[in-house]
Amino acid sequence: MYNLSEKERFLIQDLQDQEKLCIEKYEKNERAAKDTVLQNLFCSIKQDEQKHYDSLGQLLNGTIPAVNSADKAGQDYNPAPTYAGNCNLADKDSDKFLCTDAISTEKYVASAYNFDLFQFGNSDVRKLLNDIETEEQNHAEKMYKYKTINQMV
């Protein structure tokens, strides 16, 4: 059982609020996306964000969840192009905006984890927060790869 200090509890609650916002944002992006590949990507990332939210909840309850520090999901993601030839440019522009906005969100959230993890003395908590930060970076990398392959950059 890990007992968080008041400061640590506040930081975890703030990060959990960020994760909740990400979940809501990816739900909306999934519905707004025109391309089914992008819809599936947003759905997958939304599920990851829910896991982050749940992990932070476990931490608030005194349990430090195990981490997978060998995560290469962003590196391994290789989408096929879906916007080619005579595609609907309005749909492509709309999906490009959703991706760009989501990348900005991921950059912000990853930086919050990067800053906050140094506020914790427990190395297992730092590993958890670092793992979540890495996953946030992977989300941005996946969206960047989607944009690149679809010539949205």
Image (cartoon, rainbow, N blue to C red):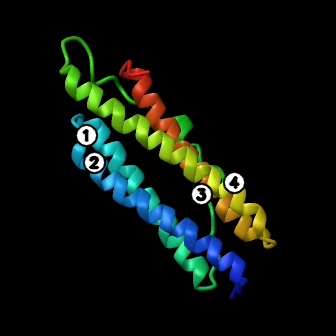
Real-space CA distance between mark 4 and mark 2, rounded to the nearest whole angstrom: 27 Å
Residue on which disc 2 sits: 30
For the residue carrying disc 4, how many other residues have a C-alpha within 10 Å: few (<14), some (14-19), or many (20+)? some
Q: Is 85 situated left or right of 63 in this image?
A: left
Question: Where in the figure is residue 143, as x and y percent of width and height?
Answer: 44, 36
Whether residues under marks 2 and 1 lie with C-beta atoms below 8 angstroms apart, the answer is yes
Asked if one can make out residue 133 in the rendered structure from this viewpoint, the answer is yes
**Residue bearing the label numbered 3:** 132
Q: Which residue is mark 1?
A: 33
Instruction: Name the quadrant containing residue 60.
Output: bottom right
Amino acid at dot 1? Ala
State how far apart marks 3 and 1 are (Cα).
Answer: 25 Å
Residue 50 to residue 114: above or below: below
* Figure quadrant of residue 41: top left
Image point (63%, 85%), residue name: 62
Of residue 35 and residue 92, the one placed in the foreground of this image is: 92
Residue 131: assigned label: none
Q: Is residue 63 left or right of residue 17?
A: right
The amino acid sitting under disc 2 is: Glu
Q: Residue furthest top?
A: 85
